[in-house]
Image (cartoon, helix red, strand yellow):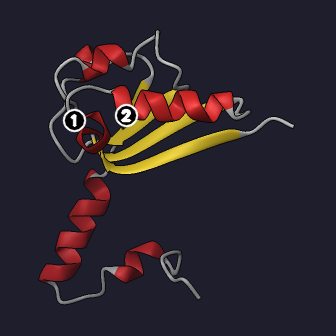
């Protein structure tokens, strides 16, 4: 059975502090345990110096996706880094707060646990 796994963190910098070793070690451990692919997602693409290069072709990660909640030099990012835009959601959230409307309604019930 093929198993792809996803590592989720709030900010890439959280696991890349001082370099990408923590995230890459986690990916290596998951692959060693039988995963067929490891993807990572970070809400904020705050990359430590040298991290984009380390996350490039040589890394064991299949892909790392980040949002554009911080300014990113997309041209300097390796192909494995996918940038997902959050601009419309942020704009709608700010508008709803300003208009004293629910932010939760933007998620059409998908943010409810029960």
Residue with the most extreme right position: 1
Dots 1, 2 in contact, CB < 8 A: yes
Residue 103 horizontal/vertical position (percent): 30, 80
Circle 2: element type:
helix
User: Where does label 2 land, which residue?
Assistant: 22
Viewer-side residue, 107 vs 10:
10
Q: Earlier in the sequence, mark 1 or mark 2?
A: 1
Q: Is residue 40 left or right of residue 20?
A: right
Viewer-side residue, 5 vs 97:
5
* Quadrant location, the C terminus: bottom right
| Residue occupying image coordinates x 49% and y 35% | 26
On screen, 82 above or below 55? below
| Residue occupying image coordinates x 36% and y 45% | 42
Residue 104 horizontal/vertical position (percent): 37, 81
Viewer-side residue, 26 vs 96:
26
Rendered image: mark on residue 17: 1
| Residue occupying image coordinates x 45% and y 49% | 8
Would you identify the image quadrant in which residue 81 lies? top left
* Quadrant location, the N terminus: top right
Gap in angstroms between the C-alphas marked 1 and 2 = 8 Å
Q: Is residue 54 left or right of residue 6?
A: left
Would you identify the image quadrant in which residue 77 lies? top left
Q: Residues within 10 Å of mark 1 (few under 14, many from 20)?
A: some
On screen, 95 above or below 14? below
Q: Residues within 10 Å of mark 2 (few under 14, many from 20)?
A: some
């Amino acid at each position: 059975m093929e198993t792809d796994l996803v590592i989720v963190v709030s900010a890439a910098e959280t696991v890349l502090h001082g370099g990408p070793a923590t995230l890459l070690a986690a990916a290596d451990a998951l692959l060693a345990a039988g995963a067929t692919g490891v993807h990572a997602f970070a809400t904020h693409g705050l990359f430590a110096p040298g991290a984009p290069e380390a996350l490039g072709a040589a890394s064991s990660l299949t892909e790392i996706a980040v949002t554009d909640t911080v300014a990113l030099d997309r041209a300097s990012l390796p192909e494995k880094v996918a940038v997902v835009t959050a601009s419309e959601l942020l704009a709608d959230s700010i508008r709803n707060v300003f208009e004293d409307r629910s932010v939760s309604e933007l998620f059409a019930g998908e943010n409810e646990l029960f």
